Image (cartoon, rainbow, N blue to C red):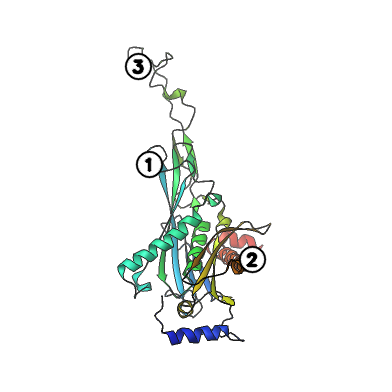
Amino acid sequence: MASTSKSEQSYVQASLLAPSPFREDGRGLLDYRHIALETGVAPLANGSARISIGDGPHGIGGGIPGTEVLAAVKLEVEDVQTEEGVDVGRVVCSVSCSPSAYPNLTNNALDDLQSDLSSVLQQTLSHRSLHPPNLSILAGRKSWLLHLDVVVLTDSGNIYDALFLASAAALRDTRVPRTRGIEYKAQNSRATEEDVPMGDAGRSGFDTRALKKSTDFELTDYWDEGEPLGKSESWPVCITLNLLPPIHYLDATPLEESATMSRLLLFFAFPNSSSGNSVLQGMRLLGPGETDLQIMKTLIPLGEKYARDLKRGLDAKFHSEALRRNPATRNKMAR
């Protein structure tokens, strides 16, 4: 989103394409800025996280002005029979951008950006292969509607990677309240046939003792407790390959993004961490530049390697956050 001149863009391109590539902050082509993670930042949410790539305004980064994104998850009960809910639950994603993060954009341009970011996040995270199995409450009656709300606080480049990192961390931090089905039964009474209408089989039409399924539910946990969201470690991460043929580089700054014609977004999920298998959940090519299909085929395995490294780093940071927030877990690990 940076406003730069053609001479600045040419200088950046020449620096990146030099035999010894040079970046304004001294990083290598495949190096990320410092990534900081903080979970549990929204007390009233079922799960939340803040990601900073570089140094955000809240000072949780590593000293370089960077990108900061906040994500929060809220669970809402939906009636499957009368509302838009589905039996297995739904996942709805939305992205909002702080006007201060994009001071040069008009209101219409900011709305378009929010819509595009929300579309990418929704299409990727709502895929049925990623659907959590524990969003159903009562089969055919009640289910959980999962709202994932993401706010872009600052954007200093590489916004898509930050969006998916924050979303994955917030979803892993989410706890689904445990529920217990309730079946209503009528008490024994001495009502006569004249007092109570009769059903077709000669039973009372008001006799709920014939119900064999739960008709309602109650919470067995407090609203902020419960079990982890199913498939919590399978949420995908995004790798943005900034293409400047014949090279590509990671974690671009706004000045570098303005000098790059094309960006390839790769969304990788790792459903089974023990086996190490990966799934390409989607991909998107941004920018006016063209990319040969053969080149893209060679970039996908490289993107998978970068995504695996990024996922490993996210796992380590999430584990350290869990130890920080849960003294019992910390004491257990120290033994």
Which of the labelled discs sits on residue 83, or is there none?
Answer: 1
Q: Nearer the viewer, residue 309 or 56?
A: 309
Query: x and y percent of residue 263 in the render?
Result: 51, 70
Three-letter code for the amino acid on which mark 2 is drawn = Pro
The first of marks 3 and 1 along the sequence is 1
Query: x and y percent of residue 289 in the render?
Result: 49, 72
Residue ID at (49%, 61%): 167
Three-letter code for the amino acid on which mark 3 is drawn = Pro
The quarter of the image holding the C terminus is bottom right
Residue ID at (34%, 72%): 105
Mark 3 falls on what kind of element? loop
Residue ID at (51%, 78%): 62
Mark 1 falls on what kind of element? loop
Which of the labelled discs sits on residue 54, or is there none?
Answer: none
User: From where the camera sits, is residue 96 visible?
Assistant: no
For label 1, count other residues whose C-alpha is less than 10 Å away and answer few (under 14), some (14-19) or many (20+). Answer: few
Q: Nearer the viewer, residue 135 or 242?
A: 242
Give the Cα separation between the discs numbered 3 and 1. 31 Å
Residue wearing tag 3: 197
Residue wearing tag 2: 301
Give the Cα separation between the discs numbered 3 and 2. 70 Å
User: From where the camera sits, is residue 314 visible?
Assistant: yes
The first of marks 1 and 2 along the sequence is 1
The image quarter containing residue 20 is bottom right
Give the Cα separation between the discs numbered 1 and 2. 43 Å
Mark 2 falls on what kind of element? helix
Three-letter code for the amino acid on which mark 1 is drawn = Glu
Q: Nearer the viewer, residue 110 or 168?
A: 110
Specify whether 155 is left or right of 303. Answer: left
Camera-side mark, 3 or 2: 2
